Image (spheres, grey):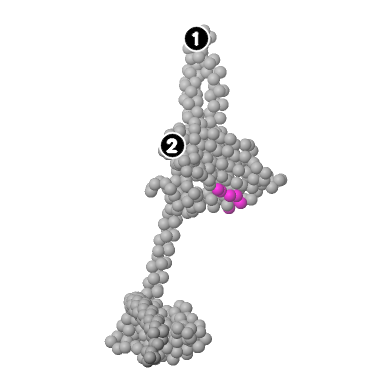
Amino acid sequence: MTPDRTPQHSKPVEEDRETWLTIMEKMDETWSQLVGQQVELEQKNSALEEAHTLIASVFDSMSDLLIACDTTLRIVRCNRAAQETLAGGDTLIGQPLAALIAPDSPISIETLSRRLTDRQRLEDQGIVIKTPNGEQPFSVNSAILRDSHHRVSGMVLAARPLGELRRAYDELDRAHKSLQEAQTQLIHAEKMASLGRLVAGVAHELNNPISFVYGNALTLRRFTKRIETYLSALHAGHSPEQLATLRREQNIDAVLDELDGSLAGITEGAERVRDIVADLRRFSSERRTHDATFDLGQIARKAVNWVLSTCGRDIATTLDIATPLEVEGHSGQFQQVIMNLVQNAVDAMDTTPEPHLRMTAYQQGEQVVLDVADNGPGFSDDIAPRIFDPFFTTKPVGKGTGLGLAICYRTVHEHGGTLRARSQPGQGACLTITLPVPAPGENTP
């Protein structure tokens, strides 16, 4: 029998096939990674080119002169404005920066070199640069350039002609003056509006005593004619019977009884006018002394009466004012403050069906507190922080300058007090003045 000599190669062949498949899988995986990295690299290159194009566009669109230099202060790049202003048709690339700086320039090439060495910036420094049209002054700023390893690679300069800066400063100055004039006009308008309310209130207050004086004066004129008639008959020597008849006809006894009352009425009306004039004098006085004390409650009542008498509509009013409430300061200024607060409350209730103004004033410890509240629409939380800002108003255009509450806020703070506002939409608003009580022993001057 012949022995079987067939070689046994099946197992090694299978191992070689598995090894080859593993190698192919690794190669496919590596190839996929390479393709992905290539795509990512192309995307990054595209984004880099777009960023480079954008930066170049911004660089060239700027009106300021931009010049980038290497560490030897040789120009390596500049924008279009620098090229057109400093070189005309020639190129600035490769030229030394020193060739552009005038000999009498406040900033010299040596100064720039030291700044580069010391890693220091320039900010709004004057420099004189040579141009095809002669030497021109510029305002220059500089920054240090660094490479990807954060090493110093040069300096970039941004220069603007001083003529443009002067024009910009002139325009800014004109705008500032115009704003100041507008602010002055608005403050004057607010003062005139307050003065108008004051005059209307004073006219209403003066109308009653003057009418009283006028009516009693007419009565005295009638009495005078009767008395003259009787006295003429008396001096003419009429008989007692004739005089008695004339006395009854002219009602002389009743005239004599009413004569004193008419004179008293005239005196009372004149005294009332005198008091109103004295109040006006105190109101208009600019004197501000630390020892001037007055009754805040009395001022508040008067302010409410003056505003409501001219508001043109019926407003329910609740006054809960303790007396006396002595505070220290300028009574005229506080009368204007309270009139402004009351007028604001009246304006806020313009569309309220049943308007109601409530004012309370009382002493709480070492402070006097005065609240002016209305039942108008109120204001939201986002308005609250701005309510005392100058020129801020929620009134329609033409009905408010936005300075009334700002002036009130300043006046109260100048007197050492506070002015706060609180509200909830649909539940009205309340403005609260808090003032310190005068120290004991201080007297009204």
Q: Secondary structure at mark 1?
A: helix
> Left or right: 295 with respect to 112?
right
Q: Dot 2: few (<14), some (14–19), or many (≥20) neighbours within 10 Å?
A: some
> How many numbered markers are drawn?
2
> Left or right: 423 with respect to 25?
right
Q: Is residue 417 magenta?
A: yes
Residue 285 visible (yes or no): no
Q: In this rendering, is residue 99 above or below 343?
A: below
Considering depth in this image, is 329 or 253 the residue closer to the camera? 329
In the displayed orientation, state which residue is furthest to the right. 441
Residue shown at 49%/41% (left/top)?
Answer: 428
Residue type, label 2: Thr
Magenta segment boundaries in residue numbering: 414-420
Considering depth in this image, is 202 or 402 the residue closer to the camera? 402
Residue 401 location (% of width, % of height) = 43, 50
In the displayed orientation, state which residue is furthest to the left. 89
Considering depth in this image, is 119 or 321 the residue closer to the camera? 119
Residue type, label 1: Thr
Residue shown at 52%/10% (left/top)?
Answer: 244
Q: Secondary structure at mark 2?
A: loop
Residue shown at 54%/20% (left/top)?
Answer: 258
* For the residues bearing labels 2 and 1, Cβ distance under 8 angstroms: no
Q: CA distance from mark 2 to mark 1?
A: 65 Å
- Of the 4 image quadrants, the one containing the N terminus is bottom left
Considering depth in this image, is 246 or 336 the residue closer to the camera? 336
Q: Is residue 357 magenta?
A: no
Res. 352 mark: 2
- Of the 4 image quadrants, the one containing the C terminus is top right
Res. 245 mark: 1
Q: In this rendering, is residue 107 above or below 232?
A: below
Q: Nearer the viewer, mark 2 or mark 1?
A: 2
